[in-house]
Image (tube, rainbow, N blue to C red):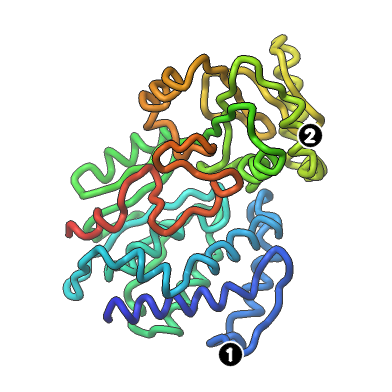
């Protein structure tokens, strides 16, 4: 199967997913195999919260629509043009997925298949229904994918390399289990935003998207703010007030109430507005409904700290012209060439 066929298949998948967005779920004409798959996807979206309480309709549809926007022929061609993929002797790559946000491991799945290799996937119990449906759709669109995608609940066997995503604790297990194989092992990372105090109200409102999307559960969710010494929190709270309805989601509210009680009993000082707590803390991984903040004295000292903490940070949101910086409101919509942990997945797959 040629690269062009693989690109065409994923482009058609993008067309199919375009029927599902946060604005509407609308069946379109001229979508391949729509009669087979549209209603199944629609049902699965409605049932997703039964399997994972954080997978509400809004966030599932956001993920599906984001991928539909990315999977264009132009993007896929641009992404793959600088690589040479072998068209013979495909390798089997074991993929272990996290389940923190909908389709969190889709980029790895896409990367393995677009490079002409085979997927052996072990899904998280928190997100195990969408990817098999997508795999079936791809096999209908491009039958050559049959035999290239396997899902297993058991022990991973007979593979040539691995990509595994988990916590710092599971990473130690992954290092042991996959030590003799070429592998990418991903640990905990968090995203940060740098504020100068000169941001517009729109930029701060857009920052709310980086904070609240997926309830802050993604590695690209902003969980830490770096702020100047004289920062005025009122401006930030005013700008993100439009996200206030998040507190009405029970799981989020329970976390807010619990963490607030813990902070108050521990006599921590908080900045809060009824649905978001800001706590001064040097750590990067904040609990749900909380964002940590840390003051910086100068740009130079801040940049030095960020450099030293590179392995803890997934992406940096702001407008101070840092390399690979993400604009406000864009942390959850990376490009195909924005690799997790800065590790080029296609380059890794090309070594086989």
Within the image, what quadrant is residue 87 found in? Answer: bottom left
Dot 2, crowdedness within 10 Å: few (<14), some or many (≥20)? few
Q: Where is residue 348 in the image (x, y as percent from the top left)?
A: 24, 53
Relative horizontal placement of residue 2, taking residue 41 as reference (left or right)? left
Of labels 1 and 2, earlier in sequence is: 1
Q: Residue at x 71, y 78 (%)?
A: 26
State which quadrant residue 273 falls in. top right
Taking depth in this image into account, of 3 and 138 the one nearest to the observer is 3
Q: Position of residue 89 (x, y in %)?
A: 17, 72
Q: Which of 272 and 35 is in front in this view?
A: 272
According to the picture, the residue beneath numbered tag 2 turns out to be 238
Q: Can you give x and y, in whole percent of width and height, for residue 302 in the image?
A: 46, 21
In the shown orientation, is residue 108 left or right of residue 225?
A: left
**Quarter of the picture holding the C terminus:** bottom left
For mark 1, does the 10 Å Cα neighbourhood hold few (<14), some (14 to 19), or many (20 or more) residues? few
| Residue shown at the point (38%, 50%) measured from the top left | 339
* 326 and 3: which is toward the camera: 326
């Amino acid at each position: 199967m040629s690269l062009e066929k693989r690109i065409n298949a994923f482009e058609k998948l993008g067309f199919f997913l375009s029927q599902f967005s946060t604005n509407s779920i609308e069946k379109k004409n001229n979508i391949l195999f729509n009669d087979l798959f549209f209603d199944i996807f629609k049902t699965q979206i409605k049932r997703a919260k039964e399997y994972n309480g954080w997978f509400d309709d809004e966030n599932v549809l956001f993920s599906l629509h984001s991928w539909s926007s990315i999977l264009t022929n132009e993007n896929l061609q641009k992404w793959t043009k600088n690589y040479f993929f072998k068209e013979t002797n495909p390798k089997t790559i074991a993929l272990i997925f996290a389940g923190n946000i909908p389709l969190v491991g889709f980029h790895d799945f896409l990367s393995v298949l677009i490079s002409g290799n085979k997927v052996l996937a072990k899904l998280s119990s928190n997100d195990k229904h969408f990817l098999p449906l997508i795999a079936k759709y791809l096999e209908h669109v491009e039958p050559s994918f049959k035999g290239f995608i396997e899902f297993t609940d058991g022990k991973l066997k007979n593979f040539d390399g691995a990509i595994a995503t988990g916590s710092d604790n599971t990473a130690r297990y992954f290092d042991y289990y996959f030590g003799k194989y070429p592998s990418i092992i991903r640990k905990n990372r968090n995203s940060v935003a740098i504020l100068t105090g000169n941001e517009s109200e729109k930029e701060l409102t857009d920052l709310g998207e980086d904070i609240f999307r997926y309830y802050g559960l993604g590695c690209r969710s902003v969980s830490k703010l770096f702020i100047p010494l004289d920062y005025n929190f009122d401006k930030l709270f005013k700008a993100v007030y439009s996200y206030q309805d998040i507190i009405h989601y029970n799981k989020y509210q329970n976390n807010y109430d619990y963490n607030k009680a813990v902070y108050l009993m521990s006599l921590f000082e908080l900045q809060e507005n009824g649905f978001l707590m800001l706590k001064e803390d040097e750590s990067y991984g904040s609990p749900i409904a909380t964002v940590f903040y840390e003051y910086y004295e100068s740009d130079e000292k801040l940049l030095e700290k960020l450099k030293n903490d590179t392995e803890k940070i997934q992406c940096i949101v702001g407008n101070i012209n840092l390399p690979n910086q993400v604009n406000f409101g864009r942390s959850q919509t990376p490009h195909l060439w924005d690799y997790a942990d800065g590790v080029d997945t296609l380059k890794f797959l090309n070594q086989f």
